[in-house]
Image (tube, coloured by chain):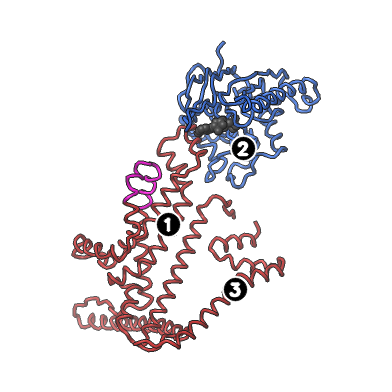
Amino acid sequence: MSNKVRVIRGLDMVGLGLLVPFVKLATGEAPRTQAREILQSVGLPVLAIGAFLLAWSLLASSVETSIGSVPGPIAVATEAGNLVADHRAERAKEAAFYERMETLKLKYAEEGKPWKDRRYSGKPTYFDQILTSLKTVFAGFVLASLIAVPLGILCGLSDRFYAALNPLIQVFKPVSPLAWLPIVMILVSALYTSADPMFEKSFISSAVTVALCSLWPTLVNTALGVASVDPDHMNVARVLKLSQMERVFKIVLPSALPLIFTGLRLSLGVGWMVLIAAEMLAQNPGLGKFVWDMFQNGSSQTLAQIMVAVFTIGLIGFALDRMMSFVQSLVSFDVAPAKA
Amino acid sequence: MTGYLEMYNLGKTYPGADGPAVIVEGFDLSLQQGEFVSLIGHSGCGKSTVLSMVAGLNSISDGGVVVDGREIDGPGPDRGVVFQAPSLLPWFTAFDNVMLGVNKVFAHATPAERSDIVEHYLTVVGLGDALEKRPAELSGGMRQRVGIARALALAPKVLLLDEPFGMLDSLTRLELQDLLLQVRDREKITTLMVTHDVDEAIFLSDRVTMMTNGPAARVGDILPIPFERPRERTALLESDEYYRLREHLLAFLEGQELKRGIAPAAA
Ligand SMILES: Nc1ncnc2c1ncn2[C@@H]1O[C@H](COP(=O)(O)OP(=O)(O)O)[C@@H](O)[C@H]1O
Ligand SMILES: [Mg+2]
């Protein structure tokens, strides 16, 4: 396979198909067609984004709120820059603190006084909060997958098991995270009572809530994937008299894998959406808490900061989805796997 | 006279909304060891139904099937099956698809012996250098070759083929017919093949069984094919005998067609 084909397939797999015409153009393939495609795949979105920004800035300047005028795109971009600058400043302060501690430690050692390590406890920066959110959503997602995939397999294998579980699935599926969270928080407080906790309670509550809300798409899709194995493939298993275990691992799971990953991708999307609400209520120090704190502040920058958070949430959600779509394309058998 | 593969008084009835639907009834056919028999008949008459009952994949309503002196009960690797669709597992390579069954049947062989068996049969069907290819990388004809290798590698007592070349283009189909003929001459394996291609039936078979139209389809006529083996297609096509046999089969099928045309008027 040529490098060009490999590059194009790679771009398609990670969901950057819109760059394909550029690759083709660079290699001199049908320039006219490529130009038209670029205009369509890049030109039109750029146009739409431009129109959105224009409408936003026009509308923003015409609305007055109790905490000042609604910020336009430029104000929001400035605020994003401020958050980055805050992050840098905070990191510099931290580095300076540890430097001071080092010199202090040496001085103590010279004077023969006992020394105790001290940790820097500055406020979390915007990037710390993003990281916390990502950790929380992954914890919830992993928990959800560990529950939903095995249950889904059982549901797909046994009609009776599915019939038994189906009413519960249907009832719990539409429940909002805002309803789950108080229950989860009370239960976590009651049950998670270690003296030296490894995780914050707010982290556990948020992650469990994410899991409760996001396990349904994986459960349902896994069950569907397992139940809809090609009857021809099941016949192969019957002719060969494969054991139940061999059936599950050699035939059922591989053929259900694409749908399982479709479910996981949907679950991660739901989880990320739910997380923000959960963090707001649970006071888990992530993006949700950031939005809530900014809202409570009510300063002139509040709206701009929250809008930065909105874009951050959207972009990260998009990136997570692209990532899952890439993994999904790795487990689908319709395309011949690329060979190096 | 008892055969190696025997279907006696075989019947299939499906429960239907307006009474039970009798698809096949009183189907009797007996194959000698090493014999190649094909089953022809109009589409929907019940050929696949008979074959899948012999394979054990479809429950038997009436009568029974005996293989090598034992009545069958469900499917098993003593009857290798090749379907119209290759039904290979797409996540396995050609090698692994064949190995799946070999592992099962030759559980006591060493891994090296098993690997040799798989390679041998894939080489027999002409895929010696495509062992590590996945189904998606193979053409339709090559996939069906893997399917044949998979069935043969089980060392089955009988081979059951349901329109194995029905989805292939005519050139590939001729190639695979030649392959099947070679395999039969080497392995002398008892084979029952469903087809709706009259030429294919004559070229490959020792006997051609003609099925009447359903409902309650049964064996209408059996035509022995006297050509010596090994056979050669061009030689066959030059003989008058070939056209006489062909005429016989076509006349039977046409007769069934007429019967079907008259049936509704008589009812
Ligand atoms: N599950 C089923 N229930 C009712 N009728 C069926 C079922 N499966 C097949 N049939 C009927 O049995 C008849 C024979 O089918 P089949 O054996 O596939 O025909 P052939 O292989 O000769 O084309 C058809 O008329 C079909 O409609
Ligand atoms: Mg059929």
Q: Is residue B73 above or below residue A6?
A: above
Amino acid at dot 1: Leu
Q: Which residue is mark 1?
A: A264
**Residue closest to the eye, B248 or B38:** B248
Query: Is ligand 1 closer than 8 angstroms to the Cβ of mark 1?
Result: no
Badge 3: chain ID: A
Name the residue type under label 2: Gln
Q: Which residues are magenta?
A: A147-167
| Circle 1 chain | A
Instruction: State ligand 2's quadrant.
Output: top right
- The overriding secondary structure of the stretch rendered in magenta is helix
**From mark 3 to mark 1, how far is it between C-alphas?**
31 Å
Who comes first in sequence, dot 3 or dot 1? 3
Q: Is residue A151 magenta?
A: yes
Amino acid type, callout 3: Leu
Give the mark toward the camera: 3 or 2. 3
- Chain with blue colouring: B
Residue that carries the numbered disc 2 in the rendered image: B144
x%, y% of residue A197?
23, 65
